[in-house]
Image (cartoon, rainbow, N blue to C red):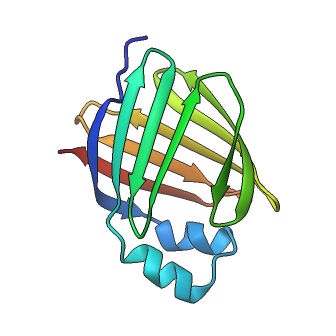
Amino acid sequence: MAVNFTGNWKHVESENFDDYLKAMGINFAMRKIANGITPKLEIQQDGDSFKVKTIGAKTKEVSFKVGEAFEDEMQVGKVKVVPSLVDGKLHFDIEGPKQKLVIEREIRSDGRLYQVMKAGDGTTCTRIFAKE
């Protein structure tokens, strides 16, 4: 596997985040809070095993192995996540209580980590992280 996601990543930019949260059914007050948070990602990768710590309003850590489904808790409730590696992208198919979601993380040529999130209605958001 050529791509290594290991590192500490700081959020630097978002595109269409509020519309994405709206499409997810997140209320105005929670969207306002979410838009004000500058999250950090701490990613440890060992082959196809990952540990991802998200530090924001609260800290959350999840460990998984590519190809093995796991359960997670998101703002929308309990979800089933199936991680895979596709063309150098860390791809997540997420089965939520109301809709299916897709999240992809990739490191692009500018060295930044791009997290592209797609809601069930097709609304897409990109969150960009720079390595610290």
Q: Single out the residue that lies furthest toward the right.
A: 98
Q: Single out the residue that lies furthest toward the top.
A: 1
- In the picture, residue 91 is in which quadrant? top right
**Residue at the (58%, 24%) spot, across then down:** 65
Q: Single out the residue that lies furthest toward the left.
A: 132
Q: Is residue 22 above or below residue 98?
A: below
- In the picture, residue 38 is in which quadrant? bottom left
**Residue at the (37%, 37%) spot, across then down:** 43
Give coordinates of residue 13: x percent, y percent. Answer: 31, 60
Quadrant in which the C terminus appears:
top left
Give coordinates of residue 31: x percent, y percent. Answer: 52, 79
Q: Is residue 30 above or below residue 101?
A: below
Give coordinates of residue 7: x percent, y percent. Answer: 27, 35
Question: 44 or 21, which is in the foreground?
Answer: 44
Q: Is residue 35 above or below residue 44?
A: below
Give coordinates of residue 20: x percent, y percent. Answer: 58, 66
Quadrant in which the N terminus appears:
top left
Question: 111 or 132, which is in the foreground?
Answer: 132
In the image, 128: left or right of 132? right
Q: Is residue 50 above or below residue 105?
A: above
**Residue at the (32%, 29%) spot, across then down:** 6
Tag count in the figure? 0
